[in-house]
Image (cartoon, rainbow, N blue to C red):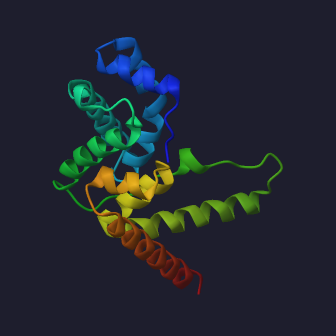
Amino acid sequence: MYPIEPEDRDLLRRAQEGQGEAFDQLVEGLTPGLYRIVRRMMPDRAEAESVVQETWIRAWKRRAHLDPSLPAFPWLARIALNIARDQLRKRWPIDFADVGEELYDHAEPNESLEKRLERQDAREQLARAIEALRPEWRMILALRYDGGLAYAEIAEALGVPLNTVRTHLRRAHLTLRQRLEADDG
């Protein structure tokens, strides 16, 4: 869950009033998280960047709807997901093969080549398993693990009941576990 700090409230309030520098600070602070979520759903980096950029344009236009007493990230995630969903309706399948390398490649300084290759293989195996999931499950996984949102924030961002989030997340975990175990066996 994204707690809202007093300085964030002030930043949100100032952005809502139309102060560009406050909005710029929001963009700078929240873009990496938005990009990680969107990148899990978009076929390539350029499209993900386009979605994030469009998200900020729409957020600026709709800033009057922003509640400074609440964290901005779930609101922004909802905008980004709606834009991504609209674009994804136009094409399938989604390729997740290259997702994660820049996000998750944290090699230890003294790590052996064998360990690094094992980790890379596991990452690729997980990416393929995620790619095979239903789109709504991928969205929930992205919001939970890439966006760090709480279940209630995911429900709000997607406009679905809280129990739907729990059910989809549980089913996604079970399906991933089964697919990964099948690949190992």
**Relative horizontal placement of residue 157, taking residue 104 as reference (left or right):** left
> Which of these two is toward me, 180 or 177?
177
> Which of these two is toward me, 4 or 139?
4
Q: Residue 91: give x, y in percent of width and height.
A: 20, 56
Q: Residue at x 43, y 58 (%)?
A: 151
Q: Is 30 rendered above or below residue 119? A: above
**Relative horizontal placement of residue 171, taking residue 50 as reference (left or right):** right
Q: Residue at x 71, y 49 (%)?
A: 107
Q: Quadrant of residue 73?
A: top left
Q: Quadrant of residue 160?
A: bottom left
**Relative horizontal placement of residue 20, taking residue 2 as reference (left or right):** left
**Relative horizontal placement of residue 86, taking residue 72 as reference (left or right):** left
Q: Is 182 rendered above or below residue 67? A: below
Q: Residue 90: give x, y in percent of width and height.
A: 16, 54
Q: Quadrant of the C terminus?
A: bottom right
Q: How many marks?
A: 0
Q: Residue 133: give x, y in percent of width and height.
A: 37, 70
Residue 160 visible in the picture: yes
Q: Residue at x 55, y 44 (%)?
A: 102
> Which of these two is toward me, 101 or 150?
150
Check the image and name the residue furthest to the right.
Answer: 110
Q: Is 93 rendered above or below residue 6? A: below
> Which of these two is toward me, 110 or 62?
62
